[in-house]
Image: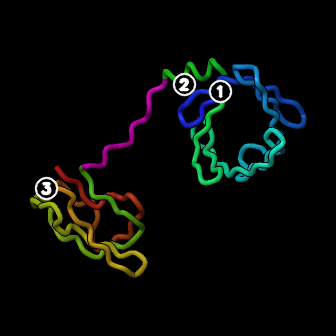
Amino acid sequence: VTLQGESWPVTIKADHDGSTVVFEDGTDLRVESDWTPGQPLARLSVGGEPLVIKTAKVPMGFRMRLRGADLKVHVQSPRQKALAGLMLEKAPPDTSKYLLCPMPGLVVKIAVEEGDEVQEGQALATVEAMKMENILKAERKGVVKAIKASAGASLKVDDVIMEFE
């Protein structure tokens, strides 16, 4: 079991009522529940104490919320853990050269043209969302390479409005 990146070697012995979790030092803990993966709430008895955990599936494990703590939990066999350690982390895409739509909305105005040099803080576009106009400004100096959206276009979150060199 890996909790928030920290490994806890355990052996889990399952039966029809729940599981007994045996830790490396030999201590054990009884966990009883009828929870199945996919259900948003897990009602458990851990060592005889009632516990309710909000759960959600994440890649290779679960996200659990308990008493204000937001935890990532992975349960793997020793072989799975060894192989997972060899996997490369997927890097998020580099969006630094794009102006992305921050929310669903309608493009009201594009304030620059292709080839324009823009300064930090300069207005680039106006997007109307929820009856409010939002002025999108340049985060740094740059040159507009391409404008991908036009006035009147309806955009989703993270749609590209313009690209910079």
Q: Is residue 56 left or right of residue 47?
A: left
Q: Nearer the viewer, residue 137 or 125?
A: 137
Please provide the residue range marked out in magenta.
Answer: 87-96
Q: Is residue 100 left or right of residue 47?
A: left
Expressed as whole percent of the image width and height from the top left, the position of residue 126 reads 27, 73
Expressed as whole percent of the image width and height from the top left, the position of residue 106 reads 36, 73
The answer to whether the residues at label 1 and label 2 have Cβ atoms under 8 Å apart is: yes
Residue linked to disc 2: 84
Q: Is residue 86 above or below residue 151?
A: above
Rounded to the nearest angstrom, the CA distance separating label 1 from label 2 is: 9 Å
- Mark 3 vs mark 1: which is more N-terminal? 1
Q: Is residue 164 above or below residue 37?
A: below
Q: Is residue 62 above or below residue 6?
A: below
Residue 58, quarter of picture: top right
Residue 8, quarter of picture: top right
Expressed as whole percent of the image width and height from the top left, the position of residue 49 reads 80, 45
Q: Nearer the viewer, residue 142 or 7?
A: 7
Residue linked to disc 1: 76
Q: Nearer the viewer, residue 28 or 121?
A: 28
Residue linked to disc 3: 141
Rounded to the nearest angstrom, the CA distance separating label 3 from label 2 is: 41 Å
Within 10 Å of disc 1 (Cα), the crowding (few <14, some 14-19, many 20+) is some
The answer to whether the residues at label 3 and label 1 have Cβ atoms under 8 Å apart is: no
Question: Three-letter amino acid code at disc 1?
Answer: Gln
In the image, which is nearer the foreground, mark 3 or mark 1?
1
The residue located at (76%, 49%) in the rendering is 51
Expressed as whole percent of the image width and height from the top left, the position of residue 116 reads 10, 61
